[in-house]
């Protein structure tokens, strides 16, 4: 659930988040809903993605 709050705080759409990470919207939503766990590789990509958008204010 933190993933969804984080995305909404930064005003990022599901589509934009998924596209930026190179994944499908369904996969991204399943992570937000905690249906599936984020793999270690994508965990670090998520951290980098949200750190970057926080810095530049996309």
Image (cartoon, helix red, strand yellow):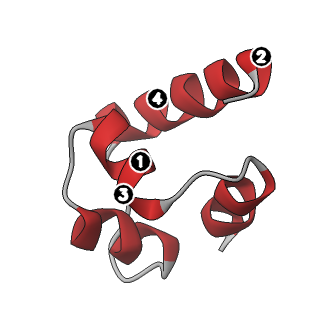
Q: Which residue is mark 1?
A: 16
Disc ID at residue 15: 3
Per the model, the C-alpha gap separating discs 3 and 4 is 19 Å
Q: Which mark is in front, 1 or 4?
A: 1
Per the model, the C-alpha gap separating discs 1 and 3 is 4 Å
Q: Give the SS element for disc 1.
A: helix
Q: Which mark is in front, 3 or 4?
A: 3
Per the model, the C-alpha gap separating discs 4 and 2 is 17 Å
Q: Give the SS element for disc 4.
A: helix
CB of mark 1 within 8 Å of CB of mark 3?
yes
Q: Counting residues from the N terminus, which is met first, the one under dot 4 or under dot 2?
A: 4
Q: Residue at x 45, y 40 (%)?
A: 43
Q: Residue at x 53, y 28 (%)?
A: 49
Disc ID at residue 26: none
Per the model, the C-alpha gap separating discs 1 and 4 is 17 Å
Q: Counting residues from the N terminus, which is met first, the one under dot 1 or under dot 4?
A: 1
CB of mark 4 within 8 Å of CB of mark 2?
no
Left or right, 9 with respect to 41, comes to right
Disc ID at residue 44: 4
| Residue 29, above or below 15 | below
How packed mark 4 is, by other alpha carbons closer than 10 Å (few <14, some 14-19, many 20 or more), is few
Q: Counting residues from the N terminus, which is met first, the one under dot 3 or under dot 4?
A: 3
Q: Position of residue 58 (x, y in %)?
A: 66, 30
Q: In the rendered image, which quarter contains the N terminus?
A: bottom right
Disc ID at residue 55: 2
């Amino acid at each position: 659930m933190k993933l969804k709050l984080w995305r909404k705080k930064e005003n990022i759409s599901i589509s934009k988040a998924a596209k930026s990470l190179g994944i499908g919207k369904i996969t991204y939503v399943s992570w937000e809903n905690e249906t599936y766990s984020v793999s270690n590789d994508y965990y670090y990509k998520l951290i980098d993605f949200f750190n970057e958008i926080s810095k530049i204010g996309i």
